[in-house]
Structure formats: C-alpha cells, structure tokens
Image (spheres, rainbow, N blue to C red):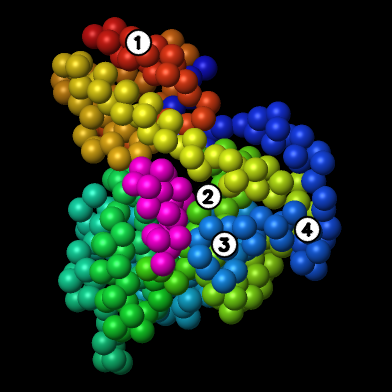
C-alpha cells in the first residue's frame, strides 16, 4: 500500500518503539515524568520560547491557545481556509465561546492591511478582537510557506493593537526544511506556537504548544480541564523526542519526492497540479471534466495507492517518511495509465 492521504499515517519505527519500551516515566500531572520534561525543554529551546507543553493533538494545542488568550464573546481573526476554521469541529465556539472572523488570503497569507481593518474598536455593539491566528505551512493552500517577512508584518499590526498572535505551525518544521530558516525565526513573530510531532516528524502521537512561562502555566491548567493531563506519558514523549532530534532534516526528502511527483504529473495531459509545491503537499485537478475524482481515486486504489479527496474536483497527495522515490515513480506510472 502506498498511502499518500496524509503525513499522519506514518507508524513508529523500531527505534521509536524501543525508545517507548525503555522510556523513563513518572506522573506527568505532577510534573514528574522526566522524558516529558526533556521533550518540553527541548521543544521550547528549538522554538526560542520560554516554555512548552506536550499536548495530545494539534487540535488540542490550538484550542488551548484560544482558551488561554481569549475570553468568551471575543473574536479570533484567521485566514478563511485555516485548519482551525475548517477542520476543528467548531471547537473555538463550542469550547472557548469565541466567534471566528475569517479573512481570505493569498496562498494562505492574509493581507496585513485587511487584518488591521478587521480589528474591532471599542464600540459597545462589537465583540473585542482577542487573537490573531496564522497557519504556516498552510495546509489547504497546499503546504504553502508563509514568508517570515509576512509573519513579521502581521505581528507588527497585532502589537500595535495589543492583540496576541498564535501560530498553527502543525507543519512548521516543513517551512524550516523548505527555506533553511529556523523554526525559532518563524516563531519569533508570534506569542504562541503549536506544532505536530505526529505528521512529517513521524512520532506516533502528540503536539507541542509553546509560549511564555506564564502562558504555559495557564495552558497546563486548560489541558487538565480538557482531560489531557496524562500520567506516565513518557512512553509517548520518548518517540516524540527522537522525532524532534532526528527527523526535521529528513523532511527535505519528502519535499524532493513531492517535487518529483509534481514534475511527473506536469507531463500528463489528464492532470494538473494546482498549487506551487513548496513542501510535501500536492493538490491535483483533472483537466477533463468528463472524469471524476472518484474514478481516479478508484483507479489508484486498484493499484494499492491511496490519496484523499480535498474539496470538489481536487485530490491531495502528501509525501512522508513511508514513501520512497520508487513509490513516486510507481504512482506516476499508474497515473499515466488513467483514461
Ligand atoms: C493536522 C493539522 C492540525 C491538527 O492536528 P491534529 O493532531 O490532527 O489534531 C492543525 N492545523 C493544521 C494546519 C494541521 O494540518
């Protein structure tokens, strides 16, 4: 099976499983799991933040950011194709009592002038703006990297108005791999940041949320309230630590494979890559409207290849550490046989 649906499908390798077996553990709710503590310290250091917290998922990390930064009735400005807006079950309203203010972006980036114009004033009719969220790399925009200069421009707007900025950096390490700019440099223009250990980095479970020590103390309480205070969770922090130490540089290979796939598809008249492939995500459209994406997905499945539907007429391919160059060549061969 060649599974290109997502970079979340990777399974822990033998070294990770051994690290899980050998992990030194304690009760993390008491702050006594040494492996979790090492993971959090290392993550904070890499991001250039005071402190970090191991959370169950990217969604939990993003939601904790909303819960800590905002009060119910406030508004969150975010890009209209953001994961938080599209794919988190309305959690910011369901859990934090927040309303969302989506702004259309270009390749996932909101115009700082539009962001500033969307910030609410002091009129008693209006909600207050409690938070601005950025997503980098941007999933729905096909893994697009938002430039550091863009993040700085948004941060300057936010600072002028005293509003915190949260970075949904589920794939922030892909931005580092694509540009050579460190995750700390990207995170510099945000108050808090979430990244996933369980996507391209290849850990089985978990995300990190980072920010000031004061923020993390409050985040710890919210994580407990949400039922995310786990106990001997060093068994999950151990493979995550390995992923964090060893896998960031490996993402370059995923990007090469995505480019290889994009180049191959550009030679096919039946398909068109519709995103600029910055990282490990390809969005592909059928050029002939007589054929459906379902037909293509079925054709791939017959050859034991799976990809995902990603909105009307669009298929998403995501490369990751379970995919080899040979796999990509095989996928191109099978795609070439369509029609
Ligand atoms: C995957 C993803 C998340 C959520 O992570 P989960 O661990 O699946 O909850 C958040 N934001 C973006 C951009 C993502 O791609």
Q: What range is drawn magenta here? A: 168-188
Identify the disc placed on residue 196. 2
Name the quadrant of the C terminus. Answer: top left
* Residue at x 37%, y 14% (from the top left corner): 329
Q: How far apart are marks 2 and 1 (CA)?
A: 31 Å
Q: Indicate left or right for 119 with 302 as reference.
A: left
* Residue at x 28%, y 55% (from the top left corner): 147
Q: How far apart are marks 2 and 3 (CA)?
A: 16 Å
Q: Indicate left or right for 108 with 246 as reference.
A: left
Query: Is the shortest distance between ligand 1 and the CB of mark 2 under 8 Å?
Result: yes
Query: Is the shortest distance between ligand 1 and the CB of mark 1 under 8 Å?
Result: no
The percent position of residue 253, horizontal first and vertical second, equals: 43, 31
Frontmost of labels 2 and 1 is 2
Identify the disc placed on residue 45. 3
The percent position of residue 163, horizontal first and vertical second, equals: 37, 79
Q: Distance between the residues labelled 2 and 4?
A: 21 Å
Instruction: Name which of mark 2 and mark 4 comes first in the sequence.
Output: 4
Q: Please give the residue where the numbered disc 1 appears in the rendered image.
A: 334
Frontmost of labels 2 and 3 is 3
Q: Please give the residue where the numbered disc 4 appears in the rendered image.
A: 34
* Residue at x 56%, y 32% (from the top left corner): 10
Q: How far apart are marks 4 and 3 (CA)?
A: 16 Å
């Amino acid at each position: 099976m060649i599974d290109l649906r997502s970079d979340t499908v990777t399974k822990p390798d033998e070294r990770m499983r051994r690290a899980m077996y050998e992990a030194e553990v304690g009760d993390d709710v008491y702050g006594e799991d040494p492996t979790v503590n090492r993971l959090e310290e290392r993550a904070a250091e890499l991001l250039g933040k005071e402190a970090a917290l191991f959370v169950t998922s990217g969604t939990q990390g993003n939601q904790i950011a909303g819960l800590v930064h905002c009060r119910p009735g406030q508004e969150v400005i975010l890009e209209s194709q953001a994961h938080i807006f599209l794919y988190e079950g309305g959690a910011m309203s369901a859990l934090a009592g927040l309303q969302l203010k989506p702004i259309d972006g270009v390749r996932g980036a909101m115009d700082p002038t539009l962001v500033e114009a969307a910030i609410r004033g002091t009129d008693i009719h209006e909600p207050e703006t409690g938070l601005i969220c950025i997503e980098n790399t941007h999933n729905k925009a096909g893994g697009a990297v938002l430039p550091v200069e863009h993040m700085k421009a948004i941060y300057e707007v936010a600072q002028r108005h005293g509003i915190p900025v949260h970075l949904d950096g589920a794939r922030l390490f892909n931005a580092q791999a694509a540009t050579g700019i460190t995750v700390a440099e990207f995170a510099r223009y945000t108050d808090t940041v979430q990244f996933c250990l369980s996507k391209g980095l290849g850990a089985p479970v978990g995300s990190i949320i980072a920010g000031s020590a004061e923020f993390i103390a409050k985040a710890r309480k919210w994580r407990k309230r949400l039922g995310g205070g786990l106990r001997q969770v060093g068994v999950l922090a151990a493979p995550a630590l390995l992923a964090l130490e060893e896998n960031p540089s490996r993402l370059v290979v995923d990007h090469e494979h995505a480019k290889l796939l994009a180049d191959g598809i550009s030679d096919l008249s039946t398909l068109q890559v519709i995103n600029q492939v910055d990282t490990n995500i390809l969005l592909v459209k059928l050029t002939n409207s007589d054929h459906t994406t379902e037909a293509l997905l079925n054709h791939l499945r017959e050859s034991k290849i799976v990809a995902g539907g990603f909105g009307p007429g669009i298929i998403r391919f995501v490369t990751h550490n379970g995919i080899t160059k040979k796999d990509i060549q095989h996928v191109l061969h099978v795609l070439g046989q369509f029609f």
